[in-house]
Amino acid sequence: MSKIVLSLSMGLLFFPIAIYAQVAKQQPKPNILIILADDMGYTDLGCMGGDAETPNLDLLAKKGILFTNFYNNAKCAPSRASLMTGQSPQRTGADHKAGNVTQGAMTIAEALKGDYTTLMVGKWHIKPAPLQLGFQRYFGAGLSAIHWWPTDEKQVRDIQLDGRTYTDKDMTVPVEKWYMETEHANYAMKFLQEEVVSKGATKPFFMYYASHLPHWPLQAPRADVERYINVFKSGTDAARKRRYDRMVKLGIINPKTCSLSPIDDKSNSWDSFTAEEKEYYQQAMAVHTAMVYRLDQELGRLFDYLKKNRLFDNTAIFFMSDNGASAEGVPAKLPIEMQMGDRGTEKRINDVGAAVCNTPFRGHKSTLFEGGIGTPMIFHWPKGIGNPGMLSKQAGAICDIFPTVLDLANLHYPSEYEGRKLNKLDGQSLLPQIKKAPIVERKLLWNYEKYAAEIQGNWKALRVSPRGKETTAGAWQLYDLSKERAETNDLASTHPELIQALSKSWEEWYQDVSKSGESDSDDNDVKDKKNKKEKKDKKDKGARKQKSE
């Protein structure tokens, strides 16, 4: 049993971090597999009404629980830090950059260390490195979104295997067939084979599978792209309507309480595009959709491996995205002498494609509109919950994963770990709702650059500052998510007292989480800058001395 000791605390969500005993001591602890997609839109999966064929993830949703009111932190590093620590990213300085999760936090891998075999593949994007934070094995790229074997030597050096640079000698396939997502799955199975299956391990495993897909650049196997090349011929406006209609049919949304939001920029309507722009977006969306398809196919191979080795039924699987689809743009120009999606191409879906992927919501990655922070979350665990096949409207956040994992593993959150005094957890365990407890009202809060947001029950307050990063300028907007989750009807003028209460609550929260992280907002970056400055000063001093001599 772990040496982690009990420390109950009140999180920022104003619910106690409950430690439940549903996982009986006589039963083996479940394996835990957390899968994180990168820049995947709210409706990119087939089970959410998307255009990609995702049978493996769809089956998890069909036989597990599909949470449709789940939230991330709108950007890569903030979401990953909260996922790993159960805390708001401000507490670890990861609200903008990679932060330092040793600053008042511990990772899931550290919490499970000793009780679990801890493995990771994929994108990390927080600091320090995985092997320094409880993981026993690691393969992946810490930051760069890599798909085909890189043409940039700097990106090649970013790919790591167990603490050293990964090379072509480590490839499981020839370089011309190498694709990062396939290698993720190959190494996930390799680690499981070497650390769990071959050793006849009695300990369960924890695996964090952090995909790069479908993050730009748009790159995918040609055969996958061809599956979807004609899907978007009728245009992006038609694709949004098609996805919306599917969502209604699937019961994910109620048209009476969630309309299809208008596109933010009228110049992005399909009829306003030139012939080349239409061709660009048809191809771009085909490649993006192919990337979602490829992610599902590789996960299917991993699931088959788990089934073959009798590990699948007692594996608790979480799946979600780190933020909404990205509107980060490039000119809508077709590649010259190459096909979009091939190695070396650097295209993106831009804001036009993001509006399709985030249907029916406003906003995109880096915003706190629903399109930036909303994600489906799938939970699947046959041995623990059977096959409920249900949609859950329970609100949840990415910081909830850590306390949920602790409950699954029958472990407790400590007040200290390896000399670190730990901040309180901001997340709340979802295990009661997984076990079919009634839906509870949540209080969720965010800050990202010029955006601030708070959800209390059905109400969402949102502020967009016109002055730039993290200012208190800008009027608060107010939306009733139970009546219009698409955020098209601002009710702030008719509910001034509610706006005042929510804004005060947000300010108190912001002061709390900022105080936790103010000692070192990004410890590693500060040290790096200090070291660079010291080296530069030393070099300049030496140069001056040599000149004087």
Image (cartoon, helix red, strand yellow):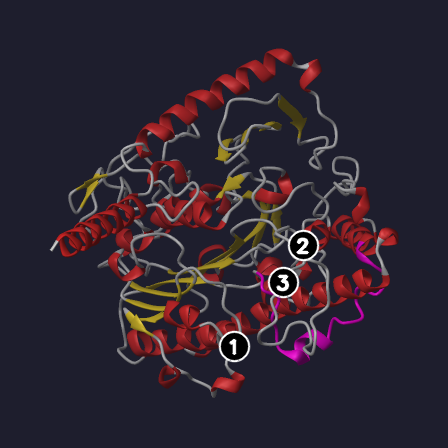
Disc 2 from disc 1: Cα separation:
23 Å
Q: Are marks 3 and 1 in contact (CB under 8 Å)?
A: no
Quarter of the picture holding the N terminus = bottom left
Q: Amino acid at mark 1?
A: Tyr
Q: Quadrant of the C terminus?
A: bottom left
Compare marks 2 and 1 and give the one earlier in the sequence: 1
Please say whether residue 19 is visible from this viewpoint.
no
Q: Secondary structure at mark 3?
A: helix
Which-is-in-front pick, marks 3 and 1? 1
Report crowding for label 3: few under 14, some 14 to 19, many 20 or more residues within 10 A (C-alpha).
some
Please state which of the two labelled residues, at mark 3 or mark 2, is closer to the viewer: 2
Residue at image point 72% right, 56% down: 49
Q: Which residue is mark 3?
A: 58
- Label of residue 273 in the image: none
Q: Is residue 235 visible?
A: yes
Looking at the image, the residue that sits furthest to the bottom is 174
Q: Earlier in the sequence, mark 3 or mark 2?
A: 3
Would you name the residue on which mark 1 appears?
Answer: 179
Q: Which residues are magenta?
A: 216-236
Q: Are marks 2 and 1 in contact (CB under 8 Å)?
A: no
Q: Would you say the magenta stretch is mainly helix, strand or loop?
A: loop
Q: From what the image shows, is residue 465 above or below residue 280?
A: above
